Structures are given as structure tokens and as C-alpha cells.
Image: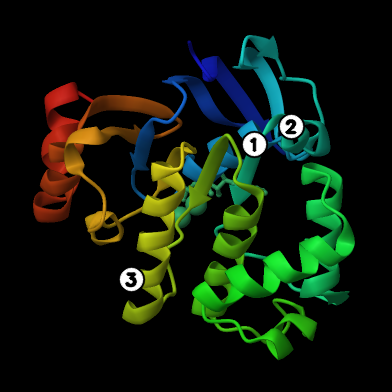
């Protein structure tokens, strides 16, 4: 019944302890939000779940559909249905978007390249990319909004079991924010479980707040878990009151 189970996760980056015992459970199709001040470990958690080699698990484990994936590489996790949309999507000089996405669809979804091409062009339009845009190099010279829309395009094409979104709303203009928010809701409606890292409730405008589980991180730990009302409260008041309540 559980999809993702993060157990007592301790993670070091360059010999510094960043995550200090994170516990998190996500069931299939659930919508989880993670909020927390800068430096609290949100991106570290996202990157560790997706298998980034820089993040060293010192204690605890990560289970996905009952399997211990703690030692698996990022490609193996992707094959099992985990996708991370980066906070800062990197430029990949020399790799064209269309070639990259085609390869992903052939490898992960078993499509043939022509089928994949047509699907990419169709879905790209819904995220405001023209066919000619797809022949540009991945993120090279892209604005913040374009980068985040490209991350969403990948997600829409792959339809992962678990989509981790690291601040899809940062550095994005209001129009892009709106289309990104709608696409996240669409993926959720189609059954993808969502783990969304954000600083603002605004990205959740298209999501039913009653369906949300919200977590607050501080200094490498989840210190509070609640419903959608937690997001509204943080929007209004910030974190101070919550941290005081939990003695963090
Ligand atoms: P958040 O996403 O909540 O802002 P991060 O997970 O990015 O937090 O960072 C948590 C802490 O880990 C910060 O103190 C940050 O400086 C440190 N950190 C994160 N990634 C690295 C890295 N690659 N190298 C060194 N320190 C890092
Ligand atoms: Mg940050
Ligand atoms: Mg971050």
C-alpha cells in the first residue's frame, strides 16, 4: 500500500550532516508538500530520493514499492518510476531537447522514435513550446520559466509513479506558474504521486487543499506534518509560530 517510505534518513554532503533523521511515507497517488526555510534540507531530500551520487546515506533507508532502493543509482530509480524535476535545471550543451526526450521515451516507455516524436510535439504545445524550440539544446539560454516548463514536459511525457518537484515555482513568471500548476494537477489526476517542494501556496491554486499532506522541514528534519491548512498558515505567518509550537 505504501509507495515511498523514507526511514530515519541521515545524509551527509561533503562530510557535513545535512539530513538528521527524516521519516516520510507516501502512498500511491497522494499529494505531499514540503516547505521550510532555505538551507533546511529540502533539495537534499529530493536529490537523495532520486539517487544523486553526491548525497551519502549514513543511516536509515529508502523503500519504493517495498524494495530497498537506498543503494540504487538514479537510472535504476527512474526505471522504477521516480522522476525529479530540478530546482535549477542544468544546461546541457550539445544535446537537443527532442533527441533527449525521444531517448527517454524509448528507454523508459518503450515507444518507437517516430511515435515518441509525435507525442513530444503534441505535449510540448500544451507547455508553450513550438516544434522549432525542441531543436534547441537542453536549457541553453533558457529563461527560468522555460526551464521549469521543460521539466514539466518531461514529467507529462514520462508520467512517473512518483514525481518530485523542487521549487517548480521559483524564478517563474505568473503565466508560466499558472500552466505549471495546472500540469501538476493534471498529472496528479492521472494517478502520479506528487512530492512538491515550495515556498508559496500560490502553486497549489489548482489543487484541492483537502487532498494535501504538508510537511515542514527545519535543520534537516521534518518537524511538523499536517493538511493543506498548514500551507495557508505558512503563507500568512511564515514559519516562526510553527517552530515555536514544536520547540524546534
Ligand atoms: P534547501 O533546499 O532546503 O534550501 P538544501 O538541501 O539545498 O536546502 O541545503 C541544505 C544544507 O546543505 C545547506 O546548508 C547547504 O549549504 C548544504 N548543501 C546542500 N548541497 C550541498 C552541496 N552540494 N555541497 C555542500 N553543501 C551543500
Ligand atoms: Mg532553497
Ligand atoms: Mg532547495
Q: Are marks 3 and 1 in contact (CB under 8 Å)?
A: no
Q: Quadrant of residue 83?
A: top right
Q: Earlier in the sequence, mark 3 or mark 2?
A: 2
Q: Are marks 3 and 2 in contact (CB under 8 Å)?
A: no
Vertical placement of residue 17 versus 145, above or below: above
Q: Are marks 2 and 1 in contact (CB under 8 Å)?
A: yes
Check disc 1 and report its element: helix, strand or loop: strand
**Residue at horizontal 41%, vertical 26%?**
221
Check disc 2 and report its element: helix, strand or loop: helix
Residue position marked by numbered label 2 in the rendering: 77
Residue position marked by numbered label 1 in the rendering: 82
Vertical placement of residue 81 versus 178, above or below: above
Q: Quadrant of residue 67?
A: top right
Measured as percent of width and height from the top left, residue 173 is found at: 38, 80
Q: Is residue 106 left or right of residue 225?
A: right
Tell me the distance, in whole angstroms, between the alpha carbons under discs 3 and 2. Answer: 29 Å
Q: Is residue 63 left or right of residue 26?
A: right
**Residue at horizontal 83%, vertical 45%?**
110
Assess disc 3: are there few (<14), some (14-19) or many (≥20) residues with their C-alpha within 10 Å of its C-alpha. some
Residue position marked by numbered label 3 in the rendering: 178
Measured as percent of width and height from the top left, residue 159 is found at: 60, 46
Amino acid at each position: 500500500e505504501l509507495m515511498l517510505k523514507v526511514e530515519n534518513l541521515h545524509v551527509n554532503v561533503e562530510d557535513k550532516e545535512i539530513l538528521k533523521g527524516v521519516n516520510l511515507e507516501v502512498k500511491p497517488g497522494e499529494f505531499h508538500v514540503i516547505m521550510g526555510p532555505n538551507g533546511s534540507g529540502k533539495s537534499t531530500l529530493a536529490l537523495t530520493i532520486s539517487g544523486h551520487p553526491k548525497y551519502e546515506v549514513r543511516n536509515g533507508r529508502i523503500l519504493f514499492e517495498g524494495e530497498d532502493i537506498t543503494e540504487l543509482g538514479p537510472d535504476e530509480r527512474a526505471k522504477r518510476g521516480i522522476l525529479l524535476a530540478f530546482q535549477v535545471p542544468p544546461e546541457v550543451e550539445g544535446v537537443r531537447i527532442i533527441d533527449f526526450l525521444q531517448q527517454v521515451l524509448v528507454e523508459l516507455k518503450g515507444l518507437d522514435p517516430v511515435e515518441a516524436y509525435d507525442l513530444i510535439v503534441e505535449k510540448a504545445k500544451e507547455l508553450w513550446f513550438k516544434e522549432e524550440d525542441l531543436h534547441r539544446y537542453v536549457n541553453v539560454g533558457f529563461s527560468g520559466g522555460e526551464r521549469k516548463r521543460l521539466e514539466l514536459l518531461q514529467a507529462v511525457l514520462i508520467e512517473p509513479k512518483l514525481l518530485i518537484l523542487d521549487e517548480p515555482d521559483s524564478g517563474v513568471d505568473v503565466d508560466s506558474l499558472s500552466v505549471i500548476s495546472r500540469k501538476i494537477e493534471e498529472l496528479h489526476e492521472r494517478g502520479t504521486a506528487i512530492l512538491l517542494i515550495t515556498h508559496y501556496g500560490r502553486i497549489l491554486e489548482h489543487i484541492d487543499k483537502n487532498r494535501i499532506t504538508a510537511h515542514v522541514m527545519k535543520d534537516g528534519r521534518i518537524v511538523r506534518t499536517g493538511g493543506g491548512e498548514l500551507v495557508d498558515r505558512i503563507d500568512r505567518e511564515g514559519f516562526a509560530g510553527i517552530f515555536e509550537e514544536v520547540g524546534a
